[in-house]
Image (cartoon, rainbow, N blue to C red):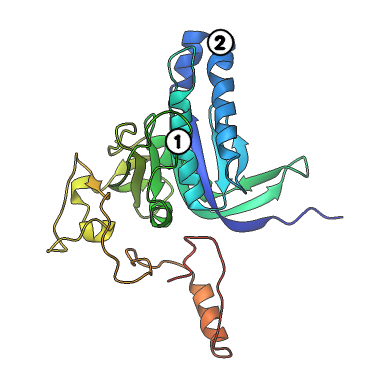
Amino acid sequence: MGEPTPTSKILVLMFTDLVDSSALKVTLGDRDYVRYIAQPHNEIFRQTVSRFPGAEENNFTGDGFLSTFERVSDAINAALLFHVALRTHGWQRDIPLTRIGIHLGESVLYEGADASQQLLASHAADMCARVMGMAVGGQTLLTRAAFDNGRQYIREHPTLECNEETPRLEWLAHGRYQFQGKAEPMEIFEVGAVGRAPLRAPEGSEKAARTVSPDEVQTSTERSAPVQDSSQLVARNETASLHEEPTPASNLPEEITSFVGREDEIEKIQELLQHTRLLTLTGVGGAGKTR
């Protein structure tokens, strides 16, 4: 019997990282770090992710996780709840913070040494890690595809099981960043609880640098509240706020980016439409079906 053939599919990716874990190990010592920080942190994360059907832990980095989700909304809600769970846990030491990146992209899946273990190889996962690497503690950053898809379905912060009042949710556009390994800049966004999340533009990292400042983001491209002049620029605390919702012209998502790629698929669709009047497209959210 030959080796199983790797398969590729579009996945919702979420990378997490425990902030300043190296410093915590030095301060606490390895044993106390594991006992008081790492083990509770890992248990909280796995409990949070288990609430979402189809979500899988793909890789454990020692101080964080790479997980996949069936829906972008699930990944975003998991990130929001994970931040809350960390903040409200009864820590015996200082409250640890995590940073999170969420991205959507095609990935190759293949079996590990154990047939039940599914490994992932993906440039999209690398990009997700780099997006996460720009975040600070308590921050969740998103790429454009994750933002567009998630914001359509998430209108408020997920309900909290603790005694805290459910916070208001804020969506922010932070402008474009040039990442190593990408020919074109990528737009970066943030979602977080008002009064809890940083809600500020990332400064960049060794592998990413800002190319457009947040106050140069046009409201017409960020789905902000309608303005009389579509070229008007807005700034809110040095970043563009996307909290207010415009009145949609239809129930279809606004085309706010150019359509890139899928040339082969478009050609095949055009060919099939020569022979049928009805053609159904299937795929995960953000794949481009509506376009």
Tell me if 212 is positioned left or right of 283 in this view.
Answer: left
Camera-nearest residue between 58 and 156: 156
Three-letter code for the amino acid on which mark 1 is drawn = Leu
Q: Residue 220: name its quadrant.
A: bottom left
Q: Which residue sits at x=55%, y=32%?
A: 45
Q: Residue 83, how many percent across, how many down? A: 44, 32
Element class at badge 2: helix
Q: Which residue is mark 1?
A: 160
Q: Residue 88: name its quadrant.
A: top left
Q: Residue 217, how many percent across, how many down? A: 22, 52
Q: Residue 100, how many percent across, how many down? A: 44, 37
Q: Which residue is mark 2?
A: 32
Image quarter (top left, top right, bottom left or bottom right) of the C terminus: bottom left
Q: Closer to the camera: disc 2 or disc 1?
A: 1
Query: Where 237 sits versus 31, above or below?
Result: below
Image quarter (top left, top right, bottom left or bottom right) of the N terminus: bottom right
Query: Where 102 sits versus 246, above or below?
Result: above
